[in-house]
Image: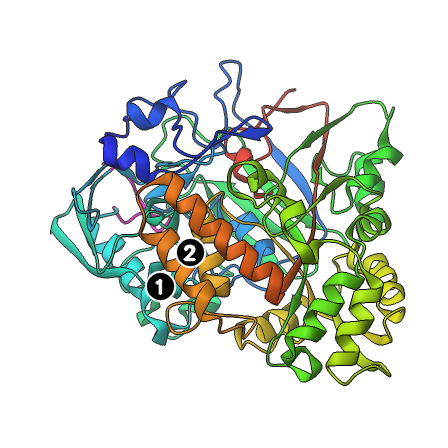
Amino acid sequence: MSDLRIDRRSALLAGVGLMGAGLLPPGLGTAWAQGAPPGGNDLYGPDDPQARRGGTLTVAIANEPPNLDPFHQAGDARTAITVLMYQGLMYEHASGQAKPLLAESMAISEDGLTYTFALRRGVRFHNGQPMTSADVKYSYDYVRDPANGSPGAADFGAIRTIDTPDDHTVVIRLAEPNASLPMTLTNRFGCVVPRDTFANPQARTRLSQQSVGTGPFMLQEFRPQSHIRMARFPNYWVQGQPYLDGILFSVQPNAASVLVALRGRRVDLALLARPQDAEQLQGQPGLSITSAPSLRQCSLDLDCNHAQLKDVRVRQAIALSIDKRAVMQAAISGKGQVLGTIPAAMQESWGAPLESLPYQKTDPARAKALLAEAGLGDGFALDLVSIIGFEWMDPAAVTIAQQLSAAGIRLNIQRVELGVWLNAFRTRNMRFTFNDWGTQPDPHILYYRHFHSTPRGADFRNWNNAEADRFMDAGMASADPAARKQAYLGLQRVMDETVPTIMLYSPDLVTVSQQRVRNYVQHPTGWWFGLAKTWIAT
């Protein structure tokens, strides 16, 4: 693997990094940002000198993606799987840094407006075509064009032009500084596909039948409500990898069936949707259980343009009525961390202290007073949307309904399929709903697309908050980590006061594997990166 060559300004722009279970304070970069990545090739996890080729690994999943389109499908259920098939110029390393992936090196101009990437040589797409700068330009121009309907378009909004002086060089010029551009060019929406992929009107459908990425695995078959089968990509650019011949993602109807499949050795690996289920597997011969901190958040989203939620006092009353710890206990038996306004794995470096946020406490009396001020002292009915297959939402909904009833809010729980929910999400018709999503460990990636007003952001919750926009713009533009943190602290105070979302908790990432599974390391996003270096002992 080649080193990422990056100057002092670039190191500052890299932001902060996760180190083990905690985070470095803003401004302290890890060693690779100054020179060579530690440990050589640590992309997708650590190397294992004992690794051997062969075998198919079966992975249980309880939440099936509606499709495998990495440009137009936003759900984590999709991203978790497609990261093995598609790659971007950069990689969201578990340290919290963006490391080179399809890029071999990156240079940034003094004004922070021009990024020059030298591409890795010898990279091929799954269709056999060599990757060139024209493919990178096509992919990123496509995703950043709002007319193409990618949920990631706003992430690329600061890009002014993309130039290709030769087949192995990409120059991205920004209209304004964006400290998070390297993280934007990673795997969620920053993947690279062959140029003119979407010229075929059937291309979006075909992405659920045949992959066209550069990743270590190729799509063999997607049979909805049954399985997703992948095969080793024989022309993968990392020599000798991946080690597995194939991966079978076995779709399970619920969390209980995952446990049955693990006990019966019908599956090799599972990330438990309910971390408390690990207690039922303790002492089971041949099973290994590991727990890791999470970048996920289980939350409630409040559509600021929906019914009574238009009134900020109603949203504040809902926030003050909810006991998050009780919700987490009901949903996952307390196996996680209660949140304020940022996921657990980012709290230490970027999060506002919970005690400084007045709407993060439970205050039923104040909630009733706010509803009375809003003319709703006699109470009202409100629908709460949950997603079928996300089992934590069912007990959480019952608990939240009980808590809100004390303030006079009567909840009607509506359960919908993930595809239906995603369509409401894309069209900004979220209403009052549960959400379950992960992020790369960068506050711009976390907040900007979701919460900035249109057209620069998607503003999925119809928040349209000008003060929050100013904080997000400042955090994006600053190259000073301390100034960035102040901007995001200000944003979190506005979020707390105006309540477009209520982050409930981050669940622990609990992974269960059979004895023959070796060298699988869970990425804090919950995505399946680690399978690129996993091998099977025989």
Q: Is mark 2 on a helix, strand or loop?
A: loop
Measured as percent of width and height from the top left, residue 107 is found at 20, 38
Query: Is 30 rendered above or below residue 10?
Result: above
Measured as percent of width and height from the top left, residue 169 is found at 16, 45
Query: Do labels 2 and 1 touch, CB within 8 Å?
Result: yes
Measured as percent of width and height from the top left, residue 63 is found at 68, 55
In the figure, is residue 443 to the left or right of 294? left
Along the viewing direction, whichever of 240 and 306 lies nearer the viewer: 306
In the figure, is residue 377 to the left or right of 528? right
**Label 2 – label 1 distance at C-alpha:** 7 Å
Residue drawn at (24%, 31%) of the image = 8
Q: Residue 399 carries which label?
A: none
* Boundaries of the magenta span: 120-130
The total number of labels drawn is 2
Q: Mark 2 points at which residue?
A: 189
Measured as percent of width and height from the top left, residue 468 is found at 47, 63
Q: In which quarter of the image is residue 175?
A: bottom left
Q: What element carries label 1?
A: helix
Q: What residue type is labelled 2?
A: Phe
Residue drawn at (77%, 38%) of the image = 266
Along the viewing direction, whichever of 319 and 62 lies nearer the viewer: 319
State the quadrant of the C terminus: top right
**Name of the residue lying farthest toward the top:** 50
Q: Mark 1 points at which residue?
A: 143
Query: Is 496 rendered above or below residue 87?
Result: below
Residue 123 is inside the magenta segment: yes
Residue 418 is inside the magenta segment: no
Other-residue count near label 1 (Cα within 10 Å), few / some / many at <14 / 14–19 / ≥20? many
SS majority, magenta:
loop
Is any part of residue 99 visible from this angle? yes
Q: What residue type is labelled 1?
A: Val
